[in-house]
Amino acid sequence: MKKNIYDIIIIGGGPAGLTAGLYASRAQMKTLLIESFSVMGQATMTDLVENYPGIEKASGFDIISKFKAQAISFGMEAASGTVTGISLKNEGDRPLWQVEDENGAREALSVIIAAGASPKKLQIPGEDDFTGKGVSYCATCDAAFFKEKDIVVIGGGDTAVEEALFLTKFGRSVTLIHRRDRLRAIKLIQDRAFRNKKMKFVLGS
């Protein structure tokens, strides 16, 4: 086998990809993690994480940075790039995966795809037309654009309520619209939202 072949190539630099990288590199496998800087991961964009064991409070960016440093300390290689193709080819008696990005092609015995999740869209008129022009899916990325404005957040789970609370630091008011008659977020987060004087709620809508 050629020496430049990886045991594992991991696509995605979020918690799942970095955990895979940590375990693989600790097992002394030749490991490469490819992460895209053009697509921000949801964990990286999270303003406050306080439900991760052993970490009282930290930003998602800080936690991901620690994950990455730990995996690299065990020998994981990290590269930035946007994967454009994956193909399978035969190399002697063993199949090889070829992973391509803008930097070229790399080969591995196995590939782990940890591409993460995407924001759930409402699929309503105007949503796509106004994305980036007032419609946003990331409070921590775009909050500064809405300074002293009246903001609407749609959703009732942990993420929606946490993002709404974060936006109260910037906006004049934040109205949370939820389709059910009660929020789904955990009680602790709900209590914070109901105590916040800038928060308004439109439920069952």
Image: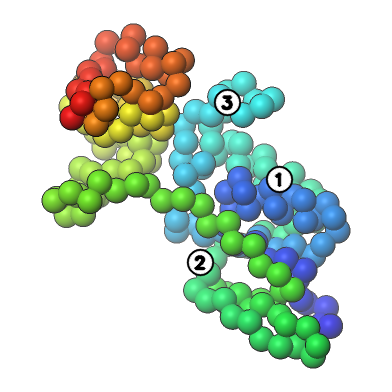
Query: Is residue 10 positioned above or below 164 on the image?
Result: below
C-beta proximity under 8 Å, tags 3 and 1: no
Q: Residues within 10 Å of mark 2 (few under 14, many from 20)?
A: some
Q: Give the residue at x 64% y 62%.
A: 112
Element under disc 2: loop
- Residue found 47% across the figure and 44% down from its top: 42
Q: Is residue 20 visible?
A: yes
Tally the marks.
3
In the image, residue 154 sits, relative to residue 198, either above or below, namely below
Residue at numbered disc 2: 82
Residue position marked by numbered label 1 in the rendering: 69
Q: Which of marks 2 and 3 is in front?
A: 3
Say which mark, if any, is on residue 51.
3
In which image quadrant can residue 191 be found? top left
Residue at 79% across / 55% down in the picture?
25
Question: Residue 147, can we see it?
Answer: no
Question: Residue 67 falls in which quadrant of the image?
Answer: top right
Helix, strand or loop status at disc 3? loop
Q: Residue at x 79, y 65 (%)?
A: 30
- CA–CA distance in space, label 3 to label 1: 21 Å
* Disc on the earlier residue, 2 or 1: 1
How far apart, in angstroms, are the residues tagged by discs 2 and 3? 30 Å
- The kind of residue on which mark 1 rests is Ala
The x, y position of residue 36, in whole percent, is: 52, 59
Quarter placement of the N terminus: bottom right
Q: In this view, does 176 lie to the left or right of 125?
A: right
Please tell me in which quadrant of the rendered image residue 64 appears: top right
Instruction: Give the x, y percent position of residue 44.
Output: 51, 42
The first of marks 2 and 3 along the sequence is 3
